[in-house]
Image: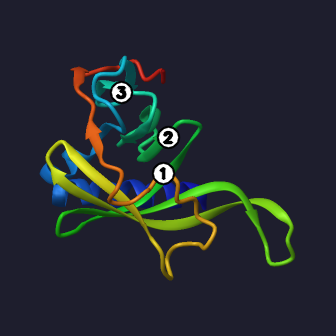
Amino acid sequence: MRTKKSLLLIFLLFLSVSMYGADLEKLWGTWNIGDQSVRMFKKTLSIGVYERTFTGLVFEPNYRGSGNARIMYNGGYYSIDEINPSEDGFLLKINWYGWVTNQEGEKKKETIYGEVAVHFLTEDTFWVELIHGLRTHEQFPSGDFAGRDTVLWRGKKIESGVSDTNQK
């Protein structure tokens, strides 16, 4: 069953890329928050090596060759289930596995789902928001999707065609 779901997700991601490929390419890479003059680190992705600061999000289209797209942050990741174009960017359906408190007040680990909107301001800047509603679990973490007051800027691509997928 898990294999069928993975194949379906890969197919949906491939379909999204083939339908909106040119636009979708601008989403992948490192997106940083804060001063652009701070010391940079390297982040190796399936699509190349990018500069990044310590704070921000990393959009990875093919995490370690698995075919799974992810949004990574310092300490974890969100899996991308679906990508749809919007007027100014993309609407992402994502999931997160973590601690959730149930109605009885007990904590347990489970997968919860959310929707995130990526709003491009320019080709190299965007802001991200968590869409609260029926498709977003009430306990879905919102800290990484701070809204229009937090603008992320694109990290520069240092080299392309990287075969080594070790994460730094």
| x then y, percent, for residue 94 | 47, 60
Q: Give the spatial CA distance, label 1 vs label 3.
A: 16 Å
* Residue in front for this viewpoint, 122 or 49: 122
Horizontal side, residue 163 vs residue 1: left or right? left
The circle on residue 59 is none
The circle on residue 73 is 2
* Residue in front for this viewpoint, 166 or 38: 38
Residue found 58% across the figure and 56% down from its top: 96
Asked if marks 2 and 1 touch (Cβ < 8 Å), the reply is: yes
Tell me if I can see residue 94 in this picture. Answer: yes
Horizontal side, residue 100 vs residue 10: left or right? right
| x then y, percent, for residue 101 | 77, 67
Q: Give the spatial CA distance, label 2 vs label 1.
A: 8 Å
The residue type indicated by label 1 comes to: Asp
Residue found 39% across the figure and 24% down from its top: 43
Q: Residues within 10 Å of mark 3 (few under 14, many from 20)?
A: many
The circle on residue 52 is 3
* Residue in front for this viewpoint, 113 or 32: 32
The residue type indicated by label 2 comes to: Tyr
Q: Which residue in the protein does label 1 denote?
A: 144
Mark closer to the observer (2, 1): 1
Q: Residues within 10 Å of mark 1 (few under 14, many from 20)?
A: some
